[in-house]
Amino acid sequence: MRIDGLQYANWSEKIFRQLREGGVDAIHVTIAYHETFRETVLNFERWNRWFELHSDLIMKGATAQDIDTARATGRTAVFFGFQNPSPMEDDIGLIEILHTLGARFMQLTYNNQSLLATGCYEDDDTGITRMGKQVIKEMNRVGVVIDMSHSADRSTIEAADLSERPIAITHANPFEWSPALRNKKDDVIRAVTQNGGMLGFSLYPHHLKHKSDCSLQSFCEMIARAADAYGVAHLGIGSDLCQDQPDSIVEWMRTGRWSKEIDFGEGSAAAPGFPAMPNWFEDNRDFGNIETGLRDVGMSADDVAAIMGGNWYRFFDDNFGPRPS
């Protein structure tokens, strides 16, 4: 089983076919960065059309059992998430509506301070806000997973402790391996994993040691060390693959509508666009390289299977429905 904890590709029939060629059984896709509720509904509509046009390749996912259906029918199950709480606007009641439409993940922040928590680019991390505490309760109740991939340290630790259900960092790596601003320090990862949560390892070059030149061996050795430190059951892949996106999308991701200035974030003024992917992971057909690399650094077949998909499957199964009474 192969499950990717996050992608933001420029979706097309080509990519849907590559998902099948790569044996990817399920993906969590970003369908909102800075969109309002109505704009996000239009993104749901667009995906519904893709499900209709490419019903032989992809299907909408709502529960972990949909992955079983996808595997049995040779398709990829697609689960929806937001990298910002903007789709719920300032209305807590929209969380349940968004879950009904298909949302299964929502980040409490995207780099900046939000109504809910502090983003990782802010100078001062004041933690989870009053509204954020209420939103966490509501997300727990309806079955939307709290994602802290772009959140600051204190906010992430508080979210892990406040949430009555496990949370996720769907796409990041350990800071000690690659000290990128958005990678996570040891105490942050421990707070998430010790509360039953998940860390998805990112292939986005700005998160990798030596960036685009990161070696497969280095990446897989990092995963093996993380398994020793945090337990293999809490780890998966969250590639953050942005395949075929134009460089202008980076500006949208980082700037949205909140600023008149270009925020280069983890890039630089000299190279504001998407960096090249490492040559061993250029698209969805390359997931087998990660499996091979994990075996080559000494991980067992069971542990490799857990990281490549088994752990995400269990996490989806436990957390995508309403909280048991």
Image (cartoon, rainbow, N blue to C red):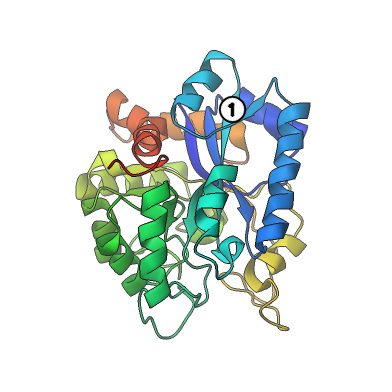
Q: Please report the residue visible at 70 percent of the width from the left and 66 percent of the height from the top.
A: 252
**Which quarter of the figure is the N terminus placed in?**
top left
Counting other residues with Cα less than 10 Å from the Cα at mark 1, is it few (<14), some (14-19), or many (20 or more)? many
Q: Please report the residue visible at 28 percent of the width from the left and 32 percent of the height from the top.
A: 298
Is residue 169 visible in this depiction of the protein? no
The image position of residue 85, as x and y in percent, is 54, 64
Where residue 123 sits, quadrant-wise, is: bottom left
Where residue 268 sits, quadrant-wise, is: bottom right
**189 w.r.t. 222: above or below:** below
Mark 1 highlights which residue? 76
Q: Is 7 on the left-hand or right-hand side of 231? A: right
The image position of residue 54, as x and y in percent, is 74, 26
Front position in the image: 173 or 1 = 1
**Dot 1 lies on which element?**
strand
The image position of residue 233, as x and y in percent, is 27, 39
Is residue 228 visible in this depiction of the protein? yes
**Which quarter of the figure is the C terminus placed in?**
top left
Badge 1 amino acid: Thr
The residue furthest top is: 72
Q: Is 230 on the left-hand or right-hand side of 134? A: left
The image position of residue 319, as x and y in percent, is 37, 42
Where residue 127 sits, quadrant-wise, is: bottom left
Front position in the image: 139 or 300 = 139
Q: Is 218 on the left-hand or right-hand side of 243? A: left
Front position in the image: 158 or 123 = 158
